[in-house]
């Protein structure tokens, strides 16, 4: 009967060190527990370690190793693609690291079930592979780099297990124990004595703990910085419902990327993200304390007080007073809005159309809609990709609450003089009709001012406010200054006003309205005749600015890919589409799996005793006492090369310190006579005695 156990190789052969039995399985099971993929870990561990008992092998040559490497690359690409589609805007690459054991399983399988102890590292890379082929073709000697992937695979699995935020004591304990086991097996295989290993155990444990702490800290640091990057480069909705700063005058860079798409029969013109009612030193904020809210989030509570769920599970949010409007709504009242917010926050404000009174068809099983008293619409527990429909009627009373006393008439002291002077100059105080005031202001700004995001404002006069500089000297700027000036001028003549920010829609696509970062806009909202209406004093030529001007071919391609991902993400949320896709992918996976099994079974061969392991003698040949010494000799001089005679291999003991040359010669002579010359009588008892002495010398040396 054939038995297999762990072997030890000489230092000169340390490049083919083989992990001991079950070490890979233990590391895989630890990874399964930390990642929540215990079933997958059990399957992989079973396949890899069962090769010690499965009597099958395959002659995997360099071409087979290349195919395994390419299959691993395919798995990696698939993992990156899935993470890119599903990720909520952070570290998709970090998520792929979790699946390292699965990704590199094909390479480890080819090595473990192949006839060789190693894989050819050069064959993994195209250029080096071509160079080897050329050298062989021209008759030059080739010395490819051979490695055993056992321990690299184990280190990869430990790395995958480290991509976690777990900080429990048993997690650290597991890492320390496994690190010690790996270091112990490598050191022991290279000839280090067990006593020395136990002495360095505290250092190894500390090293394992330190490495894991470093990796976990690095993982959290990278994750936090990637999320911070996305916050700073996202669609501009982060805290938009709470605050907004005036940009600098002069050069303003805008992102031409499509951020939202709107399906509507008519142009909605304005999509609002938020409104603000308090201005001070270049910053607009929402003064929620004026409404006696303790916290900003409290302003969203209880605004939508009714909802309807349709048969397909879609929920429509609205106010009870608008139920009749919802029930009698027409197709022309609907707008479908779709976009991506890469910021990590689960709550984000989203665009709303003028006169919207209900929201429906929100993507995400846990996502729900809220509206605050300023009319800002936000989604909580959202997905990365956002899709929803609005019920809107531009003639309807806006959801914004009526003016809040003096809050919507407040003018900062530093702006009072310039605002009052311009109101007097235009004669606005004598006008009784608010609409006339708006008309005069539009004529003045349209005729006397210019819109620009790129000009030289000259030296800044820090003794004056930005608004005074804009109104009296520059008379040129971007929308944030026109909107701020409009709010303050309207307030000066007693018209409650607020600052609004969002998008100005003007670009018509093939089947929808495209809303780009360059369409970002600010305007004012004035309370006239019992309703909040949009008042935009920005010269209208701002809409003539090309939305996608300056986009390179690469940026255009990225935008196309992003939109395809967005549409696919939404498409597969439909249960029918998802189930159909799952069936198709499952069928392809099953056929691929069966094809691989067929190919493996077709090219199988019986497994010979692995040259890297100790194997007890078996068969019809004569067994001598020297055969019982094979394991001890292996630990001393290393593995027996393929085709090397047993006696020649044992003869290498003469080079070992403490081993008697004559004793080795006598043992080999008796062994050979006993095996190959039955007519020659051998004193078996004496041979046992000689072998016993040789074992003692070998172990002692």
Image: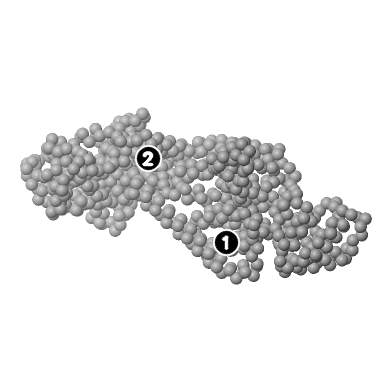
> In the image as oriented, which residue stretches furthest toward the top?
510
Residue 340 vs residue 357, the one in the foreground: 340
Which class describes the residues within 10 Å of circle 1: few (<14), some (14-19), or many (20+)? many
Q: How many marks?
A: 2
Asked which secondary structure carries label 1, the reply is helix
- Residue under pointer 2: 339
Q: CA distance from mark 2 to mark 1?
A: 46 Å
Whole-percent x, y for residue 131 in the image = 57, 40
Q: Is residue 68 left or right of residue 627?
A: left
Instruction: Identify whether 202 is placed above or below 550.
Output: below
In this view, the mark in front (2 or 1):
1
- Residue under pointer 1: 179
| Residue at horizontal 89 percent and vertical 54 percent from the top | 677
| Residue at horizontal 27 percent and vertical 42 percent from the top | 253
Q: Is residue 253 left or right of residue 125?
A: left
Instruction: Using the rendered image of the protein, determine whether residue 297 is visible from the camera's viewpoint.
Output: yes
Asked which secondary structure carries label 2, the reply is strand
């Amino acid at each position: 009967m054939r038995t297999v156990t762990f072997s030890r190789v000489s230092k000169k052969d340390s490049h083919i060190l083989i992990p001991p039995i079950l070490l890979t399985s233990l590391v895989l099971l630890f990874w399964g527990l930390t990642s929540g993929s215990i079933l997958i870990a059990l399957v992989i561990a079973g396949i890899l370690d069962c090769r010690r008992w499965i009597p099958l092998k395959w002659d995997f040559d360099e071409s087979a190793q290349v195919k395994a490497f390419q299959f691993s690359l395919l798995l990696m690409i698939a993992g990156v693609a899935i993470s890119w589609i599903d990720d909520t805007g952070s570290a998709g690459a970090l998520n792929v690291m979790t699946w390292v054991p699965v990704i590199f399983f094909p390479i480890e399988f080819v090595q473990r079930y192949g006839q060789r102890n190693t894989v050819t590292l050069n064959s993994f890379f195209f250029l080096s592979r071509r160079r080897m082929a050329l050298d062989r073709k021209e008759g030059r000697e080739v010395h490819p780099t051979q490695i055993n992937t056992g321990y690299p695979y184990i280190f990869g699995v430990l790395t995958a297990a480290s991509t976690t935020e777990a900080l429990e004591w048993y997690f650290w304990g597991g890492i320390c124990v496994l690190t010690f086991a790996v270091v112990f097996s490598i050191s022991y295989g290279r000839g280090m004595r067990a006593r020395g290993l136990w002495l360095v155990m505290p250092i190894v444990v500390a090293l394992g703990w330190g490495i894991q702490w470093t990796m976990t800290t690095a993982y959290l640091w990278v994750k936090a910085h990637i999320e911070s990057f996305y916050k700073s480069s996202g669609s501009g909705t982060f805290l938009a419902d709470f605050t907004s700063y005036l940009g600098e005058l002069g050069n303003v860079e805008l992102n031409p990327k499509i951020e939202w798409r709107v399906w509507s029969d008519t142009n909605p013109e304005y999509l609002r993200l938020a409104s603000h009612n308090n201005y001070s030193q270049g910053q607009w904020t929402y003064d929620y304390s004026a409404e006696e809210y303790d916290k900003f989030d409290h302003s969203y509570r209880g605004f939508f007080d009714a909802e309807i769920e349709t048969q397909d599970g879609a929920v429509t949010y609205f106010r009870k007073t608008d139920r009749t409007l919802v029930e009698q709504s027409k197709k022309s009242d609907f707008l479908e809005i779709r976009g991506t917010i890469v910021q990590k926050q689960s709550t984000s404000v989203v665009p709303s159309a003028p006169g919207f009174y209900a929201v429906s068809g929100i993507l995400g099983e846990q996502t729900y809609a809220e509206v605050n008293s300023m009319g800002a619409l936000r989604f909580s527990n959202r997905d990365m990709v956002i899709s929803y429909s609005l019920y809107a009627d531009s003639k309807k009373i806006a959801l914004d609450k009526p003016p809040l006393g003096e809050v919507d008439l407040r003018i900062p002291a530093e702006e009072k003089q310039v605002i009052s002077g311009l109101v007097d100059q235009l004669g606005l105080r004598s006008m009784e009709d608010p609409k006339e005031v708006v008309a005069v202001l539009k004529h003045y700004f349209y005729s006397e001012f210019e819109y620009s995001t790129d000009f030289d404002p000259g030296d800044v006069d820090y003794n004056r406010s930005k608004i005074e500089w804009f109104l009296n000297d520059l008379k040129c700027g971007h929308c944030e200054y026109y909107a701020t000036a409009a709010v303050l001028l309207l307030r000066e003549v007693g018209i409650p006003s607020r600052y609004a920010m969002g998008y100005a829609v003007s670009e018509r696509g093939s089947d929808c309205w495209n809303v780009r970062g360059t369409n970002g806009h600010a305007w004012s909202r004035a309370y006239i005749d019992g309703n909040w209406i949009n008042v935009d004093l920005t010269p209208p030529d701002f809409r003539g600015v090309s939305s996608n001007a300056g986009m390179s071919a690469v940026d255009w391609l990225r935008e196309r890919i992003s939109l395809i991902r967005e549409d696919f993400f939404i498409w597969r949320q439909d249960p029918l589409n998802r189930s159909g896709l799952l069936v198709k992918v499952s069928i392809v996976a099953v056929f691929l799996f069966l094809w691989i099994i067929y190919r493996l079974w077709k090219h199988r061969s019986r497994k010979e005793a692995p040259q890297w392991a100790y194997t007890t003698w078996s068969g019809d040949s004569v067994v001598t006492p020297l055969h019982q010494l094979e394991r001890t000799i292996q630990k001393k001089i290393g593995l027996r090369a393929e085709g090397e005679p047993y006696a020649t291999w044992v003869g290498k003991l003469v080079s070992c310190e403490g081993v008697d040359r004559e004793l080795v010669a006598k043992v080999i002579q008796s062994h050979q006579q006993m095996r190959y010359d039955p007519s020659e009588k051998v004193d078996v008892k004496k041979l046992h005695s000689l072998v016993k002495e040789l074992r003692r010398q070998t172990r002692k040396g």
